Image: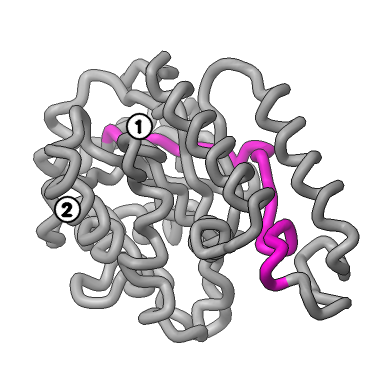
Amino acid sequence: MLTLALGLLLVSCKQGPEVFAPELYAWEEARDSIIIPHSIWKISCGSPDKAIYRYGAERLAPGVACERGWLFEGFMLCEKPCEGEDLPDYWLNPVYGTVAALEMAVDSAAAALGEPAVKRVYTIGLPTGASDEEYFAYIDRVREMAAALSIPHLELLGFTCAEEVSKRVMAYAAACHEAILDEKESIGFDYSAVEDIMDQPGVKSPCGKYTLKDVPERQQALHSALAAAASGTVIMDCGINTLVQLGRSSYTSDKELLNSIYTFILERNKN
């Protein structure tokens, strides 16, 4: 795992170094470093106006654990807010939020596998185009909402940014003992690789339109990406539905693909 040393970053300005001293929450006080997990699932649930109940514990469970053990150690929640949408509530609502659903999935897996050796961690996407002060307020609100959740198996790792943020924002997050991660290039695939839903030609995906004849090539591309993955943290972008659909599929190649993904994650987490 990658370890990031914590320390208060100072930003020089005309008035001298700017020092941030936010009040820390329990998990932040306990940190003397931030451990970036070996495997992160980059979860994109679609537009925030979609029904949140569709992205509950059942749909998240295939990325949490399988019969062979615990899977993704971290979850990158990257959806960006649409105008008028309250994204922190979308992720962190204690009743229907995605983090609460992840906690339910982890708790259910723990009943079968025993408690995980370490907590799972998650990051929340930062908005784009905000001022430093708006970023500070957003970071504080997310931290406050995270602290209010009853989720013993999960911990806020920090934030994810799709665009470069200022050194002041980086310094503020560091003062909070929270990481800010770039949305690094990930190993990506989507449900167009799943044969069961490719029976109708022209299924649309983020990369274009595919037909059933494209499935072998797309599945091989994922196998190749897994084989070529370098050491260190790997971020997999498989939307919200692919693992569920692969698990439900009756096609041999789909089952083999899911097994390859799980083997890759399980082996990566041993290192």
Q: For the magenta stretch, what is the residue range? A: 177-197
Q: Is residue 16 visible?
A: no
Q: Which residue is mark 1?
A: 174
Q: Secondary structure at mark 2?
A: helix
Q: Position of residue 14 (x, y in %)?
A: 50, 31
Q: Nearer the viewer, residue 25 or 122?
A: 122
85 relative to 166 in the view: left or right = left
Quadrant of the image occupied by residue 271: top left
Q: Position of residue 139 (x, y in %)?
A: 35, 53
Q: Who's the residue at 46% across and 48% down the image?
A: 76
Q: Is residue 230 visible?
A: yes
Number of residue marks: 2
Label 1 with label 2: CB-CB less than 8 Å: no
Q: Nearer the viewer, residue 169 or 258?
A: 258
Among the two numbered marks 1 and 2 on one chain, the one whose residue lies closer to the N terminus: 2
Give yes or no for residue 180 being in the magenta stretch.
Answer: yes
Q: Who's the residue at 82% across and 61% down the image?
A: 207
Quadrant of the image occupied by residue 141: bottom left
Q: Secondary structure at mark 1?
A: helix
Which dot, 1 or 2, sits closer to the camera? 2
Q: Residues within 10 Å of mark 1 (few under 14, many from 20)?
A: many
Q: Position of residue 195 (x, y in %)?
A: 72, 63
Q: Which residue is mark 2?
A: 107
Residue type, mark 1 in image? Ala
31 relative to 50 in the view: left or right = left
Q: How is the image coloured?
A: one colour
Residue type, mark 2 in image? Asp
109 relative to 158 in the view: left or right = left
